[in-house]
Amino acid sequence: MYIDGISFAFWNHRQTMQLRQLLYVQEIARHNFSVSAAASAINTSQPGVSNQVQLLEEELGLKIFERHGKRLLNLTPFGQSVLALANRVLLDVDNIHKLAEDSRDDQSGILSIGTTHTQARYALAPAIKEFTQLYPDIHLKMVQGTPSEITKMAETGELDIVIATEAIAKSKHLSVLPCYNWNRSVIVPANHPLLSEKSITIEQIAEYPIVSYMQNITGRAMQDRAFQEHNLTPNIVFTATDADVIKTYVEMGLGIGIIASMAFNPIKDLPLQAIDASHLFHPSTTLLGYRADSYLRAYSYAFIECFAPHLTRKVIDSRQPHYKAPHKATR
């Protein structure tokens, strides 16, 4: 029997590889070529993984991994192509399962979200509260990391949705949508000279030691750009991944702080004071990303809309690249 020129007898004879073999290849690559770590991650035995990979290589007649003795070192050029195709196959299998689960029951499941400390602490809480009221049987799994870390996890299918300011936009594998714009405040101890200024300038900020975010964290690129545009070199004396640490060191007198305005609470953060600096810096945009070729379950759409109400299912499905994020008021 032939369909589209393919003999089913030939196809059935050749197609003996198993999905689990592709999964083992994927997990070994994901765990830095450690077979034991890959086996542990998927709750199986190391000899079983090694044996299945060897059987797959024998079937294909080519090596997928470079080896030194029994130790795997890297993917061969052929192996790189196999991994790319394996990722596609396994993603489609996962999509089929998600489609079936959505058809059977769209009120239960697991939604994994990757985000940064700033988003988790200061922006996501209201959305999560609203979502859990709408979907009480959905288990939310939140992973915190740097934008680069969570972007990579979304690209490999470990996370359903990622929310951050930088790195996501650079991904070639994620669909990226704008959520909201935000800007910065300068935080200082009580009685600091800058508090007497009617409107601070970028030059005045540059006169003081600065405590702020690390590179590639929470819009740091936009912050650096503002100083560069004025030919200024700020004295960054300390960097951190989250605003709470920055506030601690400002309170200790290490310098003035530059943080996302949403991260400052005028009551809880006393005795520190915040000075609006939105006129000094270009706004940053918080972005939401998910694998472009993944199936979004109904509750995933609902969560996105809870977080960014303008991102309705219709907007998400259209994936308008020119869609602009609305401004979000400082919390």
Image (tube, grey):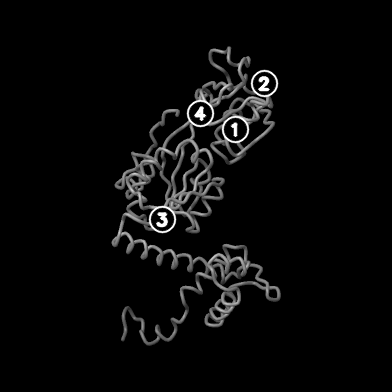
CB within 8 Å, label 3 to label 1 = no
Q: Residues within 10 Å of mark 2 (few under 14, many from 20)?
A: few
- Is 235 placed left or right of 179 in the picture? right
Residue topped by disc 1: 224
Residue topped by disc 3: 110
The answer for how far apart the CA atoms under marks 2 and 3 are is 49 Å
**Amino acid of disc 4:** Ser
Q: Residue at x 49, y 57 (%)?
A: 158
Q: Is residue 114 above or below residue 81?
A: above
The answer for how far apart the CA atoms under marks 1 and 2 are is 15 Å
Residue 68 horizontal/vertical position (percent): 70, 73
**Amino acid of disc 1:** Asp
Mark 1 vs 2, N-terminal side: 2
Q: Which mark is residue 207?
A: 2
The answer for how far apart the CA atoms under marks 3 and 4 are is 32 Å
Q: Is residue 246 above or below residue 36?
A: above
Q: Residues within 10 Å of mark 1 (few under 14, many from 20)?
A: some
Q: Residue at x 54, y 37 (%)?
A: 218
Residue 319 horizontal/vertical position (percent): 36, 48
- Is 186 placed left or right of 14 in the picture? right
Q: Nearer the viewer, mark 3 or mark 1?
A: 3
Mark 2 vs 4, N-terminal side: 2
Q: Which mark is residue 261?
A: 4
